[in-house]
Image (spheres, rainbow, N blue to C red):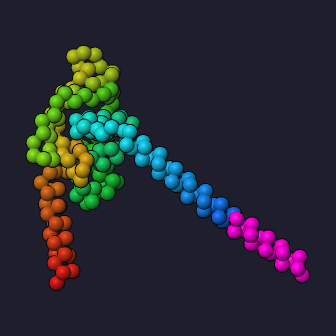
Amino acid sequence: MSFVRSGENIMKSHRFLFISLFVVSFTLLMSACGKRVDNASSSKKEQTEDEQISQMLNDAMYRLSYGDKSGLYNLEFRYQRYETNFDKYLGIGMINWANADGWDSIRVDSINYFRPESAFVYTRVYFGDRKPPDDKYEERLVIYKDNGRWIKPTVSKYGEQKRYEEIFHQADSAANAESEG
């Protein structure tokens, strides 16, 4: 009888030791990961607005060159993504036919900022499968800063986004007034 009890005590102590080691290991691991992330983010330099815009455009074109149209969807205004799911978005004519065949790179020549959240971007799109002078296409794009990031909407419109934001602002104001009164 005492042997069984001592065996139970040993099992309980092993279980306690195992759980304690697990908790300590997990805590150490999480604190070490947090330190690595903090060090990595502090050593990475902040991108300028121009670099963010160039990267946004190149990322979208790169994804489109592989047939991934979700990059275009992610660059639409919020109201468009709220009102239209991705499958419906793919059915829109200009999205359905969008492609980046032969695309090689996109270079931002200049950016003219207007209003706090808008810019004209003068670009050159280079095609690897064409010979000069048809190897590039110059275009002026209008881009917007929406929710802290630069976007280049294909289907959605700036005015519609402003109406969407106004509706949400009115709803927030009404909810605040109701909670206060």
Name the side, left or right, on which 174 lies relative to 91: left
The quarter of the image holding the N terminus is: bottom right
- In the rendered image, which quarter is residue 112 located in? top left
From the viewer's side, name the closer residue of 108 and 35. Answer: 35
- Find the magenta span and give its range: 1-17
Q: Position of residue 138 (x, y in %)?
A: 18, 27
Q: Residue at x 23, y 23 (%)?
A: 136
Count of all numbered marks drawn on residues in the image: 0
Name the side, left or right, on which 168 lies relative to 10: left
Q: Position of residue 69 (x, y in %)?
A: 34, 44
Name the side, left or right, on which 119 lies relative to 86: left
Against 108, residue 64 (above or below) is below
Work out which residue is located at the far bottom of the displayed protein and give it: 181
From the viewer's side, name the closer residue of 76 and 45. Answer: 45
Q: Residue at x 52, y 55 (%)?
A: 30
From the viewer's side, name the closer residue of 3 and 52. Answer: 3
Q: Residue at x 22, y 30 (%)?
A: 108
The quarter of the image holding the C terminus is: bottom left
- In the rendered image, which quarter is residue 22 located in? bottom right
Against 84, residue 95 (above or below) is above
Q: Position of residue 159 (x, y in %)?
A: 12, 54
> Can residue 54 be seen?
yes
Q: Position of residue 18 (x, y in %)?
A: 69, 63
Is residue 8 rendered magenta in the image? yes
Q: Residue at x 24, y 55 (%)?
A: 78
Q: Main secondary structure of the magenta part?
A: helix
Is residue 61 rendered magenta in the image? no
Work out which residue is located at the far top of the displayed protein and give it: 132
